[in-house]
Image (cartoon, rainbow, N blue to C red):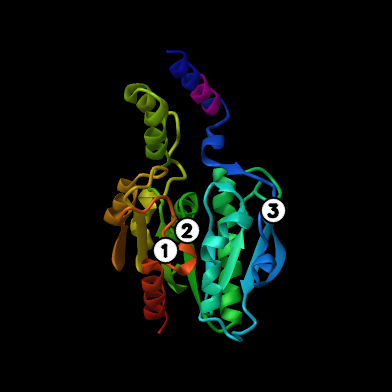
Amino acid sequence: MKKHLYHIIICFSLVLMNCSVLYYHPTKETYFTPKQMGFSYDPSFLTTKDGVKLNVWRIYSKKFETPKAVILQFHGNGQNMSAHFISLVWLVNHGYELIVFDYRGYGDSEGEPDPDDILEDSNLILDFALQEARDKGTKLIVYGQSLGGAIAMKSLSDWKDKNEVVLFCIDGSFPSYREVAKQTMNQVLFPPIGNMFAWLFHDRTSPRDSIAKLSPIPLLIIHGTEDTVVFFENGKQIFGLAGEPKVFWEIRGGGHVDWMNLGQSKFAKEFLVLLNRHLY
């Protein structure tokens, strides 16, 4: 009983703080840099409309004068980009350029994370990545992981240049913040109590009602069947809401956004084939 009372107190605290701490778990520590892993990169800052500076890395290989495509990564809710870029940086060795950035309050980015501000900032980042692709004479791919998938879905659906995205990958993500809150709370509370608290979380910035508007961007939706962070059913819901063209990859036995294994897995090799199919 004491354990459940503790969880109830925690949930009340989250509500009083607008629930933001449930969504965002930023750190300021630099875990790795591309240079430490043998990649060239250019760090820079983009300034938002309200004057907040967002940290951006452009990671590339000097072996390739023109990248096959520019890949823009929207990372998950924990740590910061210096931990998350590792999951995609192996693609640079295959001729791609990777752009990663930190949301407000993450890493060296200024400000505090806020759902509405992050959506506004995403348009700035998308414009930056598209301009980089145009300057390099190549194409743009967007990759959203977990929370980053939800942010990217919502942002891309209304972005003025969405038709220039040749592929959008949605990895281990979800259509509804409220539903994810319910699933998370039901793991630590009795379901009736968890369901009650979940309704205190708003769905105003959830992508659920925007997913159908992503068409005609080609979608690759990826989800591990054993994902205990964002349950597998969330990926299936995204697929059901999405318009064509779309493909669903069910990663049997996969956990949370862990299927790539630095490019060594079977699915990673298939992923390269799929990328080439959308580029040529």
Amino acid type of the residue that numbered disc 1 sits on in the rendered structure: Cys
For disc 3, the neighbor class at 10 Å (few under 14, some 14 to 19, many from 20) is few
Q: Could you tell me if residue 199 is visible in this image?
A: no
Residue furthest toward the front? 264
Residue at 70% over, 70% down: 42
Amino acid type of the residue that numbered disc 3 sits on in the rendered structure: Thr
Residue at 27% over, 54% down: 240
Q: Earlier in the sequence, mark 1 or mark 3?
A: 3
Quarter in which the C terminus is drawn: bottom left
Left or right: residue 216 versus residue 104 is left
Cβ–Cβ under 8 Å for marks 3 and 2: no
Q: Which residue is identified by label 3? A: 30
- Residue 62 location (% of width, % of height): 65, 82
Residue at 59% over, 74% down: 131
Q: Which mark is residue 144?
A: 2
Magenta segment: does it hold 277? no
- Residue 264 location (% of width, % of height): 44, 68
Magenta-tinted stretch: 9-14
Q: Could you tell me if residue 87 is visible in this image?
A: yes
Calculate the distance from the C-alpha at mark 1 to the C-alpha at mark 2: 6 Å
Left or right: residue 196 versus residue 145 is left
Cβ–Cβ under 8 Å for marks 1 and 2: yes
